[in-house]
Image (tube, rainbow, N blue to C red):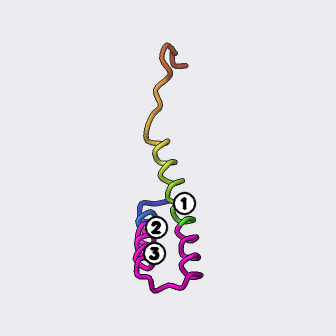
Amino acid sequence: MSAQELDEIISRLQGAASQLRSGELSQDAAAGLVEDCAALAGQASAELERRARVTVPVPPPPNQDSLL
């Protein structure tokens, strides 16, 4: 997932939050939008976790030598 795709997810989540705050959605529409937001947030979270694991080296435990 690219940075642009993450930005798109953020924009969609912000738009959904605005719609929900407006109070103009029916209960069914709001519930569907909340479900969509949960799926989007899950995608973004998984991607951010993947990036964090790739970019942050994990030091070896104390008193452990690294393997050659």
Q: CA distance from mark 3 to mark 1?
A: 16 Å
Relative height, residue 37 to residue 65 (above, below): below
Q: How many marks?
A: 3
Q: Is residue 27 magenta?
A: yes
Rendering quarter of residue 18: bottom left
Sequence-wise first label, 3 or 1: 3
Counting from the top left corner in percent of width and height, residue 61 is at 50, 21
Task: Say which residue label 1 marks.
Answer: 43
Closer to the eye: label 3 or 2: 3
Asked if labels 2 and 1 touch by Cβ distance under 8 angstroms, the answer is yes
The Cα–Cα distance between marks 3 and 2, rounded to whole angstroms, is: 10 Å
Query: Identity of the amino acid at label 3?
Result: Ala
- In depth, the one of 34 and 50 nearer the eye is 34
For the point 46% across and 65% down, the residue is 5
Give the alpha-carbon distance from disc 1 to disc 2, as whole Å.
9 Å
The magenta stretch is 8-37
Rendering coords of residue 47 (x, y %) = 51, 54
Q: Which residue is mark 3?
A: 16
Magenta highlight: main SS: helix
Q: Look at the numbered discs 3 and 1 and tell me whether their residues touch, using CB distance below 8 Å.
A: no
| Residue 31 image point, x, y percent | 57, 75
Determine whether 1 is above or below 35 in the image.
above
Give the residue at mark 2: 9
Q: Residues within 10 Å of mark 1 (few under 14, many from 20)?
A: some
Q: Secondary structure at mark 3?
A: helix
**Quadrant location, the C terminus:** top right
